[in-house]
Image (cartoon, rainbow, N blue to C red):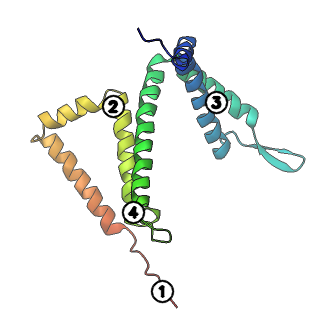
Amino acid sequence: MSQESVFRGIIQFFEKLGVYDVILPFILIFTIVFAILEKSRVFGTEKIKGDEYTRKNLNSMTAFVMAFLVVASTRLVAVINQALAHMVLLLLLSVCFLILIGSFMKEGEHAYLKEGPWRIGATVFMLIGIILIFLNALDWLEPSWNFLVKHWDSNIVGSIVLILFIVLFMYFIVKDPKKADSKS
């Protein structure tokens, strides 16, 4: 009979203590909300000795309350935990992809993901991945996919595809042409 490792016991102790369901989601939500409030200066600023500072007391209290409200909802915590697990996996895959690209390049070579269409494509791919992860965490992805498969030849799906095509077409028509760099 194999024994459980000490580290596995610590992880299980933290799980029973509520670290993963309460403490870590609270810290995450508090940090994100506080950072957004600090950066956006929603509650304004105050002058102290001629210097302008954000209202940290209001920002921190708002972030504190919002984090508690999120932690109070077990459904939100479950969605956050599931989505973050998949986002970390997506991040790990993107880092592995970049390592793979870097292994075939020598120093000083032009990096494709720094600028241009490769960067935009990689960003769009990551955005689509994150959207799909959150839809899956909310249990909306499978019903949506089943609806599309079942009603692929219906007017609704055809209308959605046509609208997307028109929006993309309008984007490519209206976008600014890139200025050619002149070397002189």
| In this rendering, the label closer to the viewer, 2 or 3 | 2
Residue matched to label 2: 136
Residue matched to label 1: 182
Q: Identify the image quadrant of residue 37.
A: top right
Residue name at image x 12 percent, y 42 percent? 155
Q: Residues within 10 Å of mark 4 (few under 14, many from 20)?
A: few
Inspect this view and state whether residue 41 appears.
no
Taking depth in this image into account, of 141 and 83 the one nearest to the observer is: 83
C-alpha gap between disc 1 and disc 3: 49 Å
Residue name at image x 29 percent, y 56 percent? 167
Q: Which of marks 2 and 3 is nearer the N terminus?
A: 3
Residue matched to label 3: 63
| In this rendering, the label closer to the viewer, 1 or 3 | 1
Q: Which amino acid does label 4 sit on?
A: Phe
Residue matched to label 4: 104
Q: What residue type is labelled 2?
A: Asn
Q: Which of marks 1 and 2 is nearer the N terminus?
A: 2
C-alpha gap between disc 3 and disc 4: 45 Å
C-alpha gap between disc 1 and disc 2: 47 Å
Q: What element carries label 2?
A: helix
Q: Is residue 135 above or below residue 8?
A: below
Q: What residue type is labelled 1?
A: Ser
Residue name at image x 33 percent, y 62 percent? 171
Quadrant containing the N terminus in the rendered view: top left
Q: Residues within 10 Å of mark 2 (few under 14, many from 20)?
A: some
Residue name at image x 44 percent, y 54 percent? 99
